[in-house]
Image (cartoon, rainbow, N blue to C red):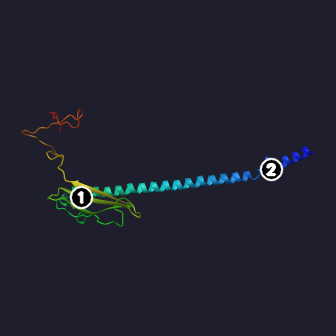
Amino acid sequence: MNLKRQLKLLKTISPSENEKGMMLIAAIALVVILALVGTSTVIRTTTDIKISSNYTNSVQTFYAAETGYNRLISEYTNNPDNYTTKASVTVIGLSTTDPCSANFGSNTAYWFPGITYGSGTPPAYVDVESYGKILGTNSIAKLKVRIKASASLFNQGIFSDQGVTLSGHGKTDSYNSSTDPTASILLSNGYV
């Protein structure tokens, strides 16, 4: 009788009967862990997309501001009087305020809140503030540049589309840049 009682006792406290709800708890824990991993992945991906978008906007606004600066340089190159007479941005024909429509590409714009000329005539330099913006966003880039007038590389050059005749003491010369690009050792074998 003692043996029957012991077997019955063992049967009632058998591990397989007491652990029937463990699979449900394990399944719920697994679902919770997967949900947390999925949520963190979505949050990280969304954050990466926003970071990428902000970087793209900052690069585009910088290029728009740089385009404005290059546009001003081309205005000075095409009409040097704008530089020597210290022409204002509006006289040159450029915008001084944030434009409402794109003037570079389909959705970017540039403008110049002001330019400041140095002393002298012609001025020794001009300080330029060029702004770039992506329309419809808060992305704005500011580029500050100092432009200095420099002498042309070809002050003593001869240019022609028909031909050149040198007489008297005219000559051409050259230098060998393969040995030292900064060398200024003149050679006597220049060609025109």
Say whether residue 73 is left or right of residue 43: left
The image quarter in which residue 99 lies? bottom left
Q: Nearer the viewer, residue 13 or 129?
A: 13
Whole-percent x, y for residue 88 in the image: 22, 64
Callout 1 crowding tier (Cα within 10 Å): few <14, some 14–19, many ≥20: some
State the image coordinates of residue 87 (x, y, percent, origin top left): 20, 63
Q: In the rendered image, which residue does mark 2 sit on?
A: 17
Quadrant assignment, res 56: bottom left
Residue 72 image position (x, y, % from top left): 26, 58
**What's under tag 2, amino acid-wise?**
Glu
Q: Secondary structure at mark 1?
A: strand
The secondary element bearing badge 2 is classed as helix
Say if 33 sits above or below 181 in the image: below
**Could you say which is closer to the camera, residue 180 or residue 51?**
51
Q: Is residue 97 left or right of residue 41?
A: left
User: Badge 2: few (under 14), some or many (20 or more) residues near its Cα, within 10 Å?
Assistant: few
The location of residue 32, given as percent across then percent down, is 64, 54
Q: Nearer the viewer, residue 96 or 11?
A: 11
Q: CA distance from mark 2 to mark 1?
A: 86 Å
Task: Name the residue type under label 1.
Answer: Asp
Q: In this figure, which residue is indicated by the disc labeled 1?
A: 127
Could you tell me which quadrant the N terminus lies in? top right
Q: Quadrant of the C terminus?
A: top left
Q: Disc 2 vs disc 1: which is toward the camera?
A: 2
- Horizontally, residue 129 falls left or right of residue 18, namely left
Residue 77, quarter of the rendered image: bottom left
Which residue is drawn at the image coordinates 60% and 54% (left, top)? 36
